[in-house]
Image (tube, rainbow, N blue to C red):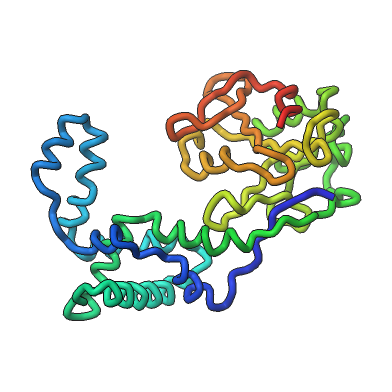
Amino acid sequence: MLRSECLPNPPADFEARLMDFVDFNDTVLASRLRIRERVMRVESALLSGPQRAADECRTDLWATLAPAAVAEEAEQVRLCLSEANDRELQVRLLEKFRQVIEHAGYALPEDDEQLLQQLELVLVRHPELLRLAYRRFRHAQVADVEVPLLSELHSDVPLERAQRGLYGIFPPGLNQDEIAVARQLDASPLVHWWHRNPVRKPESVALYRWDDGEGFYPDCVVAMMQRDSHGCIALLEVKGAHLWGEPKEIGKAAETHPDYGRVFIEGLRRGERVFHHLRVLEHRLETDGLFTLDRLGHV
């Protein structure tokens, strides 16, 4: 048996229950109006370099965009919650937004169209608002469960034999980088057995506490000869160089399994043949020494 995380299906009233976790605080409410930032602030930002200036001017940018452009951006923010019905989510958000404004003692806009425009402006100025609400709501429902390993693996085509593969073969569907790493696992006396972790199967090892509901299925489950973790298990993910700057991949690199510890991320620089351990550095994955299997023996 292996240990995994499980996220149950969302409840039927998902959008309504999510509203209990959406935090329209005073700072958020203050950003609902189309007020330009003071010119002094923009000019001072220019003295701090282009990146600082871009960050400082973002709020001012949304204040000058046409309502249709803001509405389109707000829709993309909502659609990030793939479990939600977007129309129902917008209705629920608008109603809660109205209630919070009234409770805070602020005057409501003249009509629902203006109220909706204010809500959309809030969503684009605070894109983390829904993501944080989702995490507070759904992460509390993630459960730690046991998943069974298959007793045998069936294939309609002959497969290459593997010395330490759990089923005695190299499984189908591995890409070039994954095959190279699997061969290193298979040849190492430090490895008791290794197993290609399937995606979205009853026997999968999944991680759900790292993001907004999308399961993370590390490429390989590795049983080391010695490791201070449940069953001496380590989790390993092979990451192509073209993905090292992707936000979701960075989030995966920071994930920790409750029983097996952190996920080891390995990758190959473009044009090179030697794999490296990867770690998060300045909002992207960067190399952290040559890939050696003895590191998998440490939690």
Left or right of residue 66, residue 290 in this image: right
Residue drawn at point x = 37 percent, y = 60 percent = 76
Residue most extreme to the bottom = 111
Residue 87 falls in image quadrant: bottom left
* Residue 115 percent across, percent down from the top left: 24, 74
Left or right of residue 113, residue 282 in this image: right
How many numbered discs? 0
Residue drawn at point x = 29 percent, y = 58 percent = 27
Residue most extreme to the right = 151
Left or right of residue 150, residue 297 in this image: left
Quarter holding the C terminus is top right
Residue drawn at point x = 85 percent, y = 50 percent = 1
Left or right of residue 86, residue 114 in this image: left
Vertical placement of residue 60 versus 69, above or below: above
Vertical placement of residue 197 versus 214, above or below: above
Residue 267 falls in image quadrant: top right
Residue drawn at point x = 26 percent, y = 41 percent = 55
47 or 70: which is nearer to us?
47
219 or 183: which is nearer to us?
219
* Residue 128 percent across, percent down from the top left: 40, 54
* Residue 240 percent across, percent down from the top left: 56, 33
* Residue 60 percent across, percent down from the top left: 18, 51
Residue most extreme to the left = 39
Vertical placement of residue 136 versus 242, above or below: below
